Image (cartoon, helix red, strand yellow):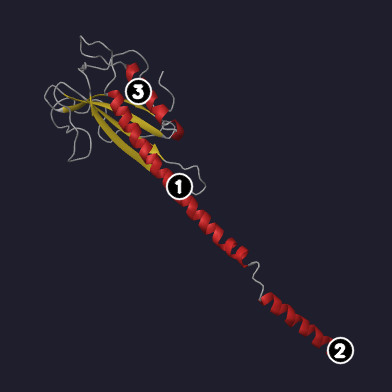
Amino acid sequence: MTNLKTVSRLAKARRVARLLAGDRSGLALVEFAFAAPLVLGMGMLGTDTALLVVTHLQVSQIAMQVADNASRVGEQDVLTARKVYERDIAETLIGAEKLGDNIEIFGQGRVIISSLQRNAQGGQWIAWQRCRGAKQYNSSYGVEGAGATGTSFPGMGEPGRYITASQGTAVMFVEVAYDYDSPLPVNVFRGNQIVYTAAFNVRDNRDLTRLYAGGPVAGCSTYSANRPT
């Protein structure tokens, strides 16, 4: 009797094994469990890359817009050379704040505006420079007063492609530096520094003797996202 029971159990076990061997109902779920993390990771990496590209474009546009706006500011007096005041530059930086509000341009970056002009000896010099932003970043091409005398200062920009100002006019040279930080959990580009420059020649007959007092001063010794006071 015992042997018959054992044989019966073995036969039942074989039948169950055959049934399980042909069962594929959970295969897709198991495959999905293995593949889901890879697919999700690749998707988030692609999204993060797209966000980085869009941020590059936005930082580049901010640099161009700030340089363009800085080349147009000043009092509206057609009879005399246009004077540019501190408030004009501060308002130009407020425009950059609006453009870069969604990426916190001043919380994670810095904007530097330089007035590139010719000195008394015909050389290039940075007559004034204004900045705003919490990022610890200084101009890569010179600070205010660089090249004030002589002709050794070549201009601003990359070596071999220096931007220079002509006699009687000025170039508004803008640098924007920004630390990228993705909102996604997969943040392989965290801390990636994005830097763009732009330059526009001033559009009107401008008083180049100085940047006139009147309004908040966006000094380059201050590292803050707040508006200058």
In this view, which residue lies farthest toward the left?
121
| Residue 2 numbered mark, or none | 2
User: Real-space Cα distance between discs 3 and 1?
Assistant: 30 Å
Q: Residue at x 28, y 36 (%)?
A: 140
Q: Which residue is mark 1?
A: 48
**Amino acid type of disc 3?**
Thr
Q: Nearer the viewer, residue 184 or 158?
A: 184
| Residue 14, horizontal then vertical, whole percent | 73, 82
- For the C terminus, the image quarter is top left
In this view, which residue lies farthest toward the top?
79
Tell me where residue 199 sits by quadrant: top left
Q: Is residue 27 left or right of residue 196?
A: right
**Amino acid type of disc 1?**
Asp
User: Real-space Cα distance between discs 3 and 2?
Assistant: 97 Å
| Residue 92 numbered mark, or none | 3
Vertical placement of residue 129 versus 1, above or below = above
**Amino acid type of disc 2?**
Thr
Q: Residues within 10 Å of mark 2 (few under 14, many from 20)?
A: few
- Dot 3 or dot 2, earlier in sequence: 2
Q: Is residue 107 left or right of residue 204?
A: right
Vertical placement of residue 180 versus 106, above or below = below
Secondary structure type for disc 3: helix
Vertical placement of residue 28 versus 100, above or below = below
- For the N terminus, the image quarter is bottom right
| Residue 222, horizontal then vertical, whole percent | 38, 26
